[in-house]
Amino acid sequence: MSTKDAVNIGLIGFGMAGQVFHAPVIASVEGLNLKAIQTTNAANIKIAGERYPEAEIVSQTSSLFASREIDLIVVATPNHTHFDLAREALEADKNVIVEKPLTVTSAEGFELVKLAEAGGKILTVHHNRRWDSDFLTVRRVIEKNLLGRLVEAEIHYDRFRPLLRGDTWKENALPGTGVLYDLGSHLIDQAQTLFGLPEAVTGFIRTERTAGKIPDNFEVLLHYRDLKVTLKSGMLVREELPRYILFGESGTFVKHGMDVQEEALKNGAIPALTNNWGVEPKEQWGTVNTEINQIHFVGKIESEIGDYRKFYENVRDAILLKTKINVTGAQAANTIKIIELAMQSHHEKRTINFS
């Protein structure tokens, strides 16, 4: 891709998030140029040099902030560092993408929102799961009113990881760690995208694994006027459960299986070089049992095509003033607020109003 007129990107952090979820997708989007990568890890420096030889490898974040060529900073670092790095980037007059979650506290998140607004810069968060095939399918089922008036929704993000991993900061009791911040931020963002902000929040949070240092299981109930939304995640779920369950006055929709993009990226696939990117196999299509125009229908619904490139395409176009940003900083800060309310609910053993 020619770098002329491209949005030049400086990527901070080249661990799993940088290597898997950001760099390959950036490289697959026209009009984006991975200009520089910041990392101090020797192994990651080698990988970055081999995969992205045109990108400059730097050791200091200040090099990216000071560069007049870089338009967009991507923060792909441990959660507790997000606020300081995003603030420095905005103060350096850069547009910013922060890996989810935006920050550890909602107060920090809203401070970044104000800073971005004051400087006229884009602040967004990598809630790429809005472009999962299953979420896009659920959204379409709701928009097409296939189930009638929706009364209940349940969204899962489960794993089976009984052993603690000693090679990651995510297993240590640092600010912003735990499954509620990690996977929960995706589920909360999806619920907020589908249904808006809740009226109240109830949270149940646990540490289930032996010698676990962080919360690894949660159930969060989001209360709406005529709708109950349940968000669940655990690390000791060996049998596959549905990812989505929707209940309406006319019927039910159930969807199993994870979006295929993450596994493909982990296996080294590049979206721009992969045929049928984001296409789910028929075995993962969701099942609907409903009544449409007084006809009882039971069958499969073909999954929408997932595509994480859409996130970056939207950021590119927003920077170029061609469209509005899809994932707003305010939405991401409200996701953190819901996490805080869920934790407060758990500790106080009561439902907390969202206000």
Image (cartoon, rainbow, N blue to C red):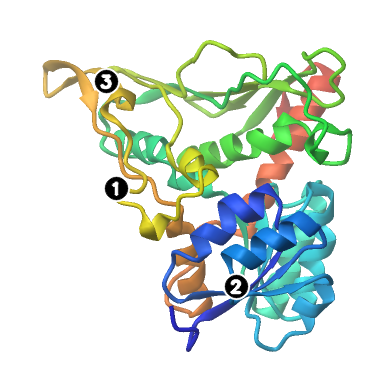
Q: Return the residue at label 3.
A: 288
Question: Dots 3 and 2: beta carbons under 8 Å?
Answer: no
- Which tag, 3 or 2, sits closer to the chain's start? 2
Q: Tell me which corner region of the image, top left, top right, bottom left or bottom right, holds residue 57.
A: bottom right
Q: Return the residue at label 1.
A: 276
Q: Nearer the viewer, mark 1 or mark 2?
A: 2
Question: Dots 1 and 2: beta carbons under 8 Å?
Answer: no
Structural crowding at the residue carrying mark 3, measured as other residues with C-alpha within 10 Å and reported as few (<14), some (14–19) or many (≥20)? many
Q: Amino acid at mark 2?
A: Pro
Which quarter of the rendered picture does the C terminus lie within? top right
Is 177 rendered above or below residue 286?
A: below
- Which tag, 1 or 2, sits closer to the chain's start? 2
x, y (%) of residue 78? 79, 49
Which quarter of the rendered picture does the N terminus lie within? bottom left
Q: Is residue 277 left or right of residue 229?
A: left
Q: Secondary structure at mark 1?
A: loop
In 3D space, how far apart are the residues under numbered discs 3 and 1 (Cα atoms)?
25 Å
Observer able to see residue 97? no
Q: Amino acid at mark 3?
A: Val
- Which tag, 3 or 1, sits closer to the chain's start? 1
Is 12 rendered above or below residue 240?
A: below
Q: Is residue 298 left or right of residue 213?
A: left
In 3D space, how far apart are the residues under numbered discs 3 and 2 (Cα atoms)?
48 Å
x, y (%) of residue 228? 52, 22
In the rendered structure, find residue 53 and report the number of the disc placed on it: 2
Q: Residue at image x 67%, y 28%?
A: 201
Structural crowding at the residue carrying mark 1, measured as other residues with C-alpha within 10 Å and reported as few (<14), some (14–19) or many (≥20)? few
x, y (%) of residue 338? 69, 37
Q: Nearer the viewer, residue 31 or 267?
A: 267
